[in-house]
Image: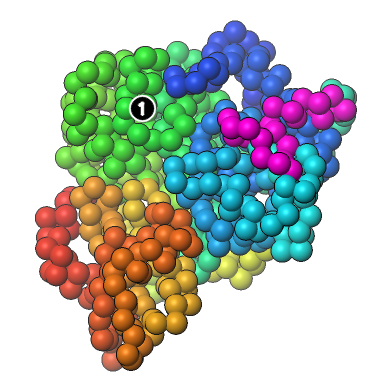
Amino acid sequence: MEMIEKTLGQVIKDLAKKYPDNTAVKYATRDYCRTWKEFDEETDKVAKAFMALGIKKGDKVAIWATNIPEWLLTLFGAAKCGAVLVTVNTNYKVFELEYLLSQSDTKLLVMQGIYRDTNYVNIVKQLIPDLENFRDGAVTDEKLPFLERIVYAGEEETPAGLLNFKNLDRFAAEISDKDLEERQKEFDCYDVTNMQYTSGTTGFPKGVMLTHYGIINNGKNIGDSMKFTEKDKLCICVPLFHCFGLVLATMACITHATELVPVEAYSPIPVMTAISQEHCTAIHGVPTMFIGILGHKDFANYDFSSLRTGIMAGSPCPIEVMKQVVEKMYMKDIVIVFGQTEASPGCTMTTTDDSLEKRVGTVGRAFPGVECKIIDPETNADVEDGKPGEFVARGYNIMKGYYKMPEATAQAIDKDGWLHTGDLCIKDSEGYYKVVGRIKDMIIRGGENIYPKEIEEFLYTCEKISDVQVIGVPSRKYGEEIMACIILKPGCEMTEDEVKDLVKANMARHKVPSYVRFVTSFPMNAAGKIQKYKMREEAIEILKLHEDAAIETA
């Protein structure tokens, strides 16, 4: 594969020159449609506005919103002025938002108003109580010493104190084309452009530093393997704040002049409408999304005949679901990408040329430019084909490290540059990989990475709880669900709903346990180490999840 040595801004500029009148972005659910030329001009204005607001090369610009147009404008506007985009999970509550804004040193925050039952403005007011007393979003607060500006991207009336995204134009006018060109000489494609927060392998979320070069070329390889061209249209219903939406979708599109058809937030009806109305040729999703579409009562009322390809990834993919997607949604060229955020994120992939057996039964072969192998996690020695071991990778796609966390970086990437994923895989004689488990106990629920320690640390703050262990249990719908196993302090009582409500009020919705089990002890080995796998086995018996546990995945 020929590598692209360009920044995100340069890629968009090239598209504006080569395909000026082709549609770049079109929403089926709102009045927003831009050609590549228009999109290039609009993102230039956003870049200039950010510069006028004091954003320098390397400064952090955070985006907290669903897949609205302002998300894409912020992504490319930040990239064009050399800023680093910090992506914020739309499910975050105050506890997580404060940590992310503080740890990332975010200088400017672009935020939506309301998403589902979460009022983002109210959450920010908990952090900055006198928010409404500021002008044009120019904020100051001791808890967030780096934060200087908040821009509002909601459709509702602009809350007092904030600067509306639509008013960025007046700031952009202060910066000339020459000013922007001079700024762009200060950075290149090997600089960090994006920070994705992931729980990774230990503790609290870490900022994964990804470069222009890493995410653009990862996206190019993905689009190549799907045979994307300027005639394709990709329905994007996975969140843009994940690598799935940012790289597997957006970067795959911009490296092939493929039209983006975003859906603001996944729900079967808007997704089916977008596919049918815009004649999309591809759609990405986690298995849960495809299951929701296939099982919807109105499925037969929509036209999926334009579909050709797409990616099912984000959590283990049930083989039967893959087969139904091929048959009922006409996605004969559906593929799988496997990797993790720290790898930009793809390491292996199936292609449209692979047999259906390989595309539903494996996660493909190594990307061009990426070395992959299986090792013994205890000795680091290479493991022969057909035997399970830890999947490790190195290449252009590996992150620059975790932001301000050198020790955690050294734990993830060894002295020889190999990223240790913690995933247990098998490689066959043809070079195809199959995921068989995880060394680490991260829970993947419907494509969301959930690290139990973060929920455990929070529940430990409850004065009624003596000890807690959080585990993943199998789920037909989501791949895994969360179970909190709790030992209460003597004389204390709690209900399942109390535990769930406590987590729901303080953490993102996807971290709320589906199951709560009160126990008097945890299974341990001779060394006193808690055996989570035994707790999972017990949960399968108690909850009668044998069928869910038996679902075969790639």
Q: Is residue 56 magenta?
A: no
Mark 1, residue position: 271
Is residue 196 placed above or below 223 in the rendered structure? below
Magenta range is 153-175
- Amino acid type, residue under disc 1 in the picture: Val
Quadrant of the rendered image containing residue 550: bottom left
Q: Position of residue 120 (x, y in %)?
A: 56, 47
Question: Nearest the camera: 472 or 224?
Answer: 472
Question: Nearest the camera: 370 or 446?
Answer: 446
Residue lying at 58% horizontally and 44% vertically, measured from the top left: 64
**Residue 178 shows in this picture:** yes
* Label 1 residue SS: helix
Q: In the image, 177: left or right of 209? A: right
Q: Position of residue 115 (x, y in %)?
A: 48, 41
Q: Position of residue 477 (x, y in %)?
A: 24, 47
How was this image coloured?
Answer: rainbow
Is residue 335 placed above or below 198 in the rendered structure? above
**Residue 472 shows in this picture:** no
Residue lying furthest top in this view? 21
Residue lying at 26% horizontally and 64% vertically, measured from the top left: 515
Residue lying at 27% horizontally and 52% vertically, measured from the top left: 479
Question: Nearest the camera: 46 or 225?
Answer: 46
Q: In the image, 528: left or right of 545? A: right
Q: In the image, 546: left or right of 305? A: left
Question: How many numbered discs?
Answer: 1
Q: Residues within 10 Å of mark 1 (few under 14, many from 20)?
A: many
Residue lying at 81% horizontally and 26% vertically, measured from the top left: 170
Q: Is residue 159 magenta?
A: yes
Quadrant of the rendered image containing residue 306: top left
Is residue 26 placed above or below 457 in the rendered structure? above
Is residue 527 placed above or below 250 in the rendered structure? below
